[in-house]
Amino acid sequence: MDIRAIFMGLAFAVMWSSAFTSARIIVASAPPMSALALRFLLSGLIAVALARWLGQSWTLTRSQWRATLVFGVCQNALYLGLYFVAMQTVQASLAAIIASAMPLLVALAGWVIFGERVRALGVAGLFAGLAGVALIMGARLQGGVDLFGLGLCIVGVLSLTVATLALRNATSGGNFLMVVGLQMLVGSAALWGPALLFETQVFQPSWTLLWAFAYTTLVPGLAATFVWFLLVDRIGTVKAATFHFLNPFLGVLIAALILGEGLGPLDILGVVIITGGILAVQLSKQTPRGREDA
């Protein structure tokens, strides 16, 4: 892994982790599903326009349409929709920690459900990471966390896990940006119905809301996706996924710096354990250099 790939991976991890803080700011002043539907509409239109400018086609293969619909519904509408609603009452740091468990849940499902071989390092990391999540959950439950919001976060990360497992072997076929843009438009379409049905369309306009909305649309929404694509193209999915180990730490750090969210000793210990567990799981998936050269 060269220095450019390292910087790209760090940039992706920072952008991905910052999304929870910007979302927390948005839902304090806007109806969550409506704001997210609008974000996906704008991000999707920008991505599709850029894709057309780059010469990418509207015509997708069957597998590309499947990826577009599954991710549009499971990742964008369900995962992020539930998270936006949850973060009206759940701190950004806790939301980031729960979402960061996705690589652990994918590894656990691959091992238990699909019978995939997991090396000893991966097994140790898996159990350590899940123990870290349980530790933080226990501490937050004792501290009076909103159970409904916590439940929405758990269902959301399970939805993201299902989408990831369903499309592990899916490819963009060189049409990546178009697929991403259409996924966002699918997510927007899926969210508008419940947003208009269940939410009161009351916004509290401010410069803070405007900047947070612009940031979440352009940076986690578009820039992080683009950097992830470049990173995967440069070093492969398995090595790129190693950078997910930074997400618990960065998510908590950004929320603390910008929102002033406090952390207890058990929270800090749990974040360290989860970070190490995710790193161990991802490193266990990489082929040893000697076997790679054989």
Image (tube, rainbow, N blue to C red):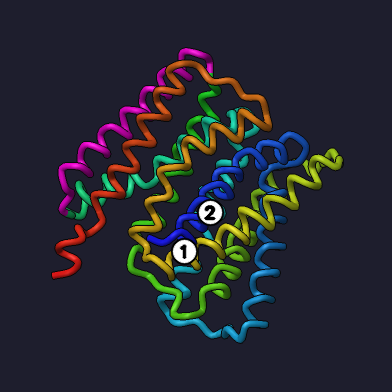
Q: Which residues are magenta?
A: 117-144
Q: Label 1 neighbourhood size at 10 Å, few (<14), some (14-19), many (20+)?
A: many
Q: Is residue 136 magenta?
A: yes
**Residue 252 in the image: x percent, y percent?**
54, 32
Measure the C-alpha gap from mark 1 to mark 2: 9 Å
Q: Quadrant of residue 286?
A: bottom left
Q: Which residue carries the number 2 mark? A: 12
- The kind of residue on which mark 1 rests is Leu
Q: Is residue 226 magenta?
A: no
**Residue 28 in the image: x percent, y percent?**
73, 34
Rendered view: 187 above or below 36: below
| Tag of residue 231 | 1
| Tag of residue 68 | none
- The kind of residue on which mark 2 rests is Phe
Q: Tell me the residue at 55%/61% (across/down).
A: 225
Q: Tell me the residue at 86%/40% (across/down).
A: 206
